[in-house]
Amino acid sequence: MYISSSLRLNSYDAVSFVKAFEKECVDVAARLNVPIENILGLAAQESQYGKGRIARDLKNYFSMHAPAPLQIGSEHPKENRKIKVAKFSRFRDCAESFERRFGHAVKGKADPLVFAQALVAVRFNTGRAEDGGRANFIPYLVDIIRAVKGRLSC
């Protein structure tokens, strides 16, 4: 079976992202009583496995709007002057900010589907592109969480 070089690179990048931030998610996941892959999967989805500009430039791996706990600054996304996104000094601060802001909604929600539904319920993401969310956010996040779970074993 032939696997294209772009697919191999994508898989390598995804595994690298998971391995780079796995330890950073242990405490947050434990306090929220969810599997690590839920937190890492959400960060992977929101940051394009760390490749997105907001993650790279602002260390905002959860695409959180400002103001946010632990932020060190904020700026407008290049394509949207209506909102500001938070800037963090490192991944851990961003993950803990997510915990403070949205942890109440996902605490104890270990199942990926229930976890994703809880995020939509508190408008972390509306699931609708017309109002700024990601279309089909729930099934997309569930798939990424499952993929991250597999990548944790690599």
Image (cartoon, helix red, strand yellow):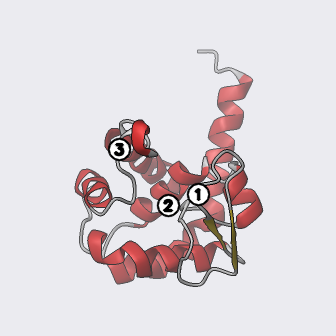
SS for callout 2: helix
Disc sitting over residue 34 in the figure: none
Q: Quadrant of residue 4?
A: top right
Distance Cα–Cα, label 1 vs label 3: 24 Å
Which is more foreground, mark 2 or mark 1? 2
Q: Are marks 1 and 3 in contact (CB under 8 Å)?
A: no
- Seen in the picture, residue 68 relative to 35 is either above or below; the reply is below
Q: Name the amino acid, label 1.
A: Val
Task: Name the N-terminal-most of marks 2 and 1.
Answer: 1
Find residue 106 and report its image quarter: bottom left
Q: Which label belongs to residue 18?
A: 1
**Closer to the N terminus: mark 3 or mark 2?**
2
Callout 3 environment at 10 Å: few (<14), some (14 to 19), or many (20+)? many
Residue at which label 2 appears:
40
Q: Amino acid at mark 3?
A: Gly
Q: Residues within 10 Å of mark 1 (few under 14, many from 20)?
A: many
Give the vertical position of 128 relative to 121 (above or below). above
Quarter of the rendering occupied by the N terminus: top right
Q: Are marks 2 and 1 in contact (CB under 8 Å)?
A: yes
- The three-letter code of the residue at mark 2 reads Leu
Q: Nearer the viewer, mark 1 or mark 3?
A: 3
Identify the mark nearer the N-term, 1 or 3.
1
The answer to whether any part of residue 134 appears in the image is: yes
Report the residue marked by disc 3. Answer: 127
Above or below 128: residue 44? below
Name the spot of residue 123 as percent of width and height, x first.
Answer: 34, 59
Q: Residue at x 71, y 27 (%)?
A: 6
- Residue for point 29% across, 77% down: 104
- Residue 121 spot, x, y in % from top left: 25, 58
